[in-house]
Image (cartoon, rainbow, N blue to C red):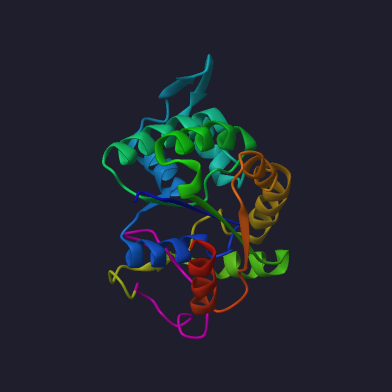
Amino acid sequence: MKQVIILFGPPGAGKGTQAELLADKLGYYHFESSKIIEACFENESPDKVFNVDGQSFKVEDEKKRWGAGELNSPPFVVNLMVEKINELAEMGKSIIFSGSPRTVYEAEKEIPLLKNLYEKENIKFVLLEISAETTIFRNSHRRICELIRHSILFNKETESLDNCPLDGSKLVRRKGLDDPETIKNRLKVFADQTYPVISRIDKEGIHVKKVNGEQTVADVHKDVLEAIK
């Protein structure tokens, strides 16, 4: 049975960490919108223009928005996401989303597509809840590995690490994106533009399950598994 799991929550809620654990456990494809967007910025010319729904979006402009902690233009993002979703569905892959949809516009475009490709009862939506203070602390201390670019959770066991325990590459901070001021801006953007996605999900008839994201990784994982049953 093909399934879709959407992990939702503010920056630093642990969406990526939990998605990696689930992908490894269940064999699903971990769909990271941030990586798809970053790959576009790295591989496409800054002057390239995407034409979507009668609008034009220049890669250079979208990269500047990304670096400032703002959301990218929804049509630009949806264009990238829909292409990948169709590709995975055609391959018969189950998907775990971490960080998408980020806006109501994206939800309006992506959720009906997912319902059509996977059927509503096979879509699970889990909200990882954490406080604003936790978001700021986690993101300001977050590091990613240079090779695979996955996040390393900050705790007593990892704070002295210099290299990724999975691939051995150097652990680095995301320049600009995890600065305290940028994080505060990202929190405001989440409250104003991303959190309203939950209402849209509810309208689509998909039940929203809530999980306390401030627990240990293991306890959050246990509760997420319970939520997607």
The reply to whether residue 60 is in sight is no
Query: Is residue 29 left or right of 151 when viewed as pictured?
Result: left
Residue 153, how many percent across, how many down? 49, 72
Q: How many marks?
A: 0
Taking depth in this image into account, of 190 and 222 the one nearest to the observer is 222
Query: Is residue 89 left or right of 211 when viewed as pictured?
Result: left
Taking depth in this image into account, of 70 and 217 the one nearest to the observer is 217
The reply to whether residue 98 is in sight is yes
Residue 226, how many percent across, how many down? 52, 69
Query: Is residue 29 left or right of 33 when viewed as pictured?
Result: left
**Which residue is at the far bottom?**
156
* Residue 131 sits in quarter: bottom right
Taking depth in this image into account, of 172 and 121 the one nearest to the observer is 121
- Residue at 28% over, 69% down: 167
135 vs 34: above or below:
below
Identify the main secondary structure in magenta: loop
Residue 30, how many percent across, how many down? 38, 54
Q: Is residue 191 magenta?
A: no
- Residue at 56% over, 32% down: 74
Q: Which residues are magenta?
A: 145-164
**Which residue is at the far top?**
54
- Residue at 73% over, 44% down: 192
